[in-house]
Amino acid sequence: MAILKILQYPDERLHKIAKKVTQVDESTRKLVRNMAETMYAAPGVGLAATQVDVHECIIVVDISETHDQLNILINPEIISSSGEEECEEGCLSVPGIYETVSRAARITVRALNEKGEIFTLNAEGLLAVCIQHEMDHLIGKVFVEYLSQLKQTRIRAKLKKRLRETM
Ligand code: NI
């Protein structure tokens, strides 16, 4: 397994649109394993393939503290959603920034697992938030883009400054 490099906002590659996985095979499973390892090492509760510069519809999510409830969603699709919930979110691609975003409170998502089998998952609370956040990455959207232009400008400036300081 390997720790993958996570793209940092405002990297343009975070805005690429991911393609559907046409065949779940050994290379998909290898990528999923590496994504999970990268997420756990960060540490984070979710990671989209987009964030490691692979533009395929794959996300991994594990909101447990024990790191033993890994959800692998390949080609995820939200088939129903209800309610609204505000939650403070963060992102491994936007380190140190936490902002409140409004999302559906409950979702039903359909996806393929690592064996290529279709399944549906009902999620609410943090898990629902996390899946929606990661699915946004697949369409090139980073959570800070829900914020006002002013806030986004401030966040970009802050992250660029920090990047310069660490180089
Ligand atoms: Ni994120």
Image (spheres, rainbow, N blue to C red):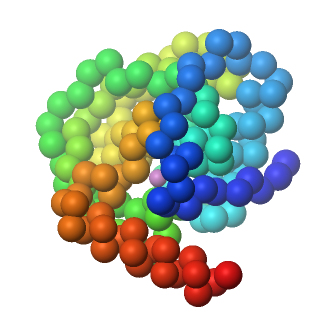
In which quadrant of the rendered view does residue 112 lie? top right
In which quadrant of the rendered view does residue 156 lie? bottom left
Residue at 35%, 24% (x, y): give it.
Answer: 78
Query: Is 3 or 139 nearer to us in this picture?
Result: 139
Q: Is residue 18 above or below residue 65?
A: above
Residue 11, how many percent across, how many down? 53, 56
Residue 59, how many percent across, how many down? 55, 37
Residue 19, how many percent across, how many down? 56, 23
Task: Please indicate, yes or no, whether residue 146 appears anywhere in the rendered image.
Answer: yes
Residue at 49%, 60% (x, y): give it.
Answer: 9
Q: Is residue 18 above or below residue 141?
A: above
Q: Is residue 154 left or right of residue 92?
A: left
Residue sitting farthest toward the bottom: 165
Residue sitting farthest toward the left: 83
Quadrant, the C terminus: bottom right
Give the mark count.
Answer: 0
Residue 153, how many percent across, how many down? 30, 68
Task: Please indicate, yes or no, whether residue 71 appears anywhere in the rendered image.
Answer: no
Q: Is residue 153 above or below residue 114?
A: below
Residue at 36%, 29% (x, y): give it.
Answer: 122
